[in-house]
Image: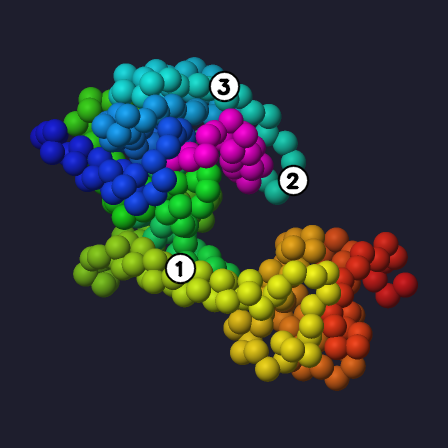
Amino acid sequence: MSTAEDLIPVRRAVREFLAAHPRVDFDVAVSGGADSLALAEAGAHEGHKLGLRVRALVVDHGLQSGSAEIAQRAASAARRLGVDEAEVLTVEVTGAGGVEAAARRARYSALARKGRSLVLLGHTRDDQAETVLLGLGRGSGPRSIAGMKPLDPPWGRPLLDVPRSATRAACAALGVEPWEDPFNTDPRFTRVRLRREVLPLLEDVLSGGVAAALARTAAQLREDVETLDALAAELRGEGETLDAKALETVPPALRRRVLRRWLLDRGACDLSDAHLRAVDALVGKWRGQGGVWLPGGLVVTRTHGRLSMERREAARGE
Ligand SMILES: Nc1ncnc2c1ncn2[C@@H]1O[C@H](COP(=O)(O)OP(=O)(O)OP(=O)(O)O)[C@@H](O)[C@H]1O
């Protein structure tokens, strides 16, 4: 039986989030699924107590027939749940990397454009656990195992400690029927199989508490990553070139972060661990080697103890 008590966990999480972060009028990104509908209700409830105006933003990707209607339904549900206004943003999904990735890019860029300084997303503890497990399994490094951040302006994620079951229960108590995205049950997606096959098995083998433990691991690691990143930012300084000589004695974990920051600031993208390690060798294993090629025709070289990066139009080896 659903009761008003089922609203408490989501509302409490939003209340605590708003107490800990700048309190400004905010938007809630609403897909029409249980997580974001429960978030919209709690956002309106807690936001109004603080005298804030709350708006729902729904993105229509236009990818399925009837998507406009699904989006309108999500907006109406959010209005019924108490938000001051609800708007549908229609986007065009284009570009490389598969339709899912292109849809995500279009969604986030529309939400960032239209949203105010704070846009709340409905990622839950289970989403966090899946992200951490994916990062671990793919060896994508501490940054991805550290999971999603609660505050990453304009994005706010108040529900990272709330289980998905709590948002389902809140929707049942509110009498709203969430929309189920067919992508969320399609076993062709790795994340779906993690959710439906791997995590339940892990929960069984480890006698429960796995999602919470993974989320806790992420939070601990995030503190470490943020501390190292802050130290790296200080060491990186300004300037277009980098003092490789001075970095030689810096511990590798910190040094690679300095290099990563510098490369990204100078326009590098799609950096893999192998790229970073090759650039790092120009510092830590310097023996007069040649330049390191990065995606997009960028080359990093070391001369007179400093690293510099330039774009070379000629193909590799020419
Ligand atoms: N169509 C949409 N319109 C508005 N907000 C959305 C939409 N789809 C997702 N969101 C927001 O993003 C949150 C996360 O949803 P979902 O996990 O499907 O998104 P994702 O961006 O693919 O996830 P991730 O960021 O984990 O890759 C939702 O709770 C909601 O706040």
Q: Residue at x 86, y 54 (%)?
A: 313
Q: Residue at x 40, y 46 (%)?
A: 151
How far apart are the alpha carbons under marks 2 and 3? 22 Å
> Mark 3 sits on what residue?
65
- Region in magenta: 99-120
> Mark 1 sits on what residue?
222
Q: Report the quarter where the C terminus lies.
A: bottom right
How far apart are the alpha carbons under marks 1 and 2? 30 Å
Above or below, 311 relative to 241? above
> Mark 2: few, some, or many residues within 10 Å (few <14, many ≥20)?
few
> Mark 2 sits on what residue?
96
Nearer the viewer's eye, disc 3 or disc 1?
1
- Amino acid of disc 2: Ala
Mark 2 in CB contact with mark 3 (< 8 angstroms): no
Q: Was residue 113 drawn as part of the magenta stretch in this picture?
A: yes
How far apart are the alpha carbons under marks 3 and 1? 40 Å
SS assignment at label 3 = loop
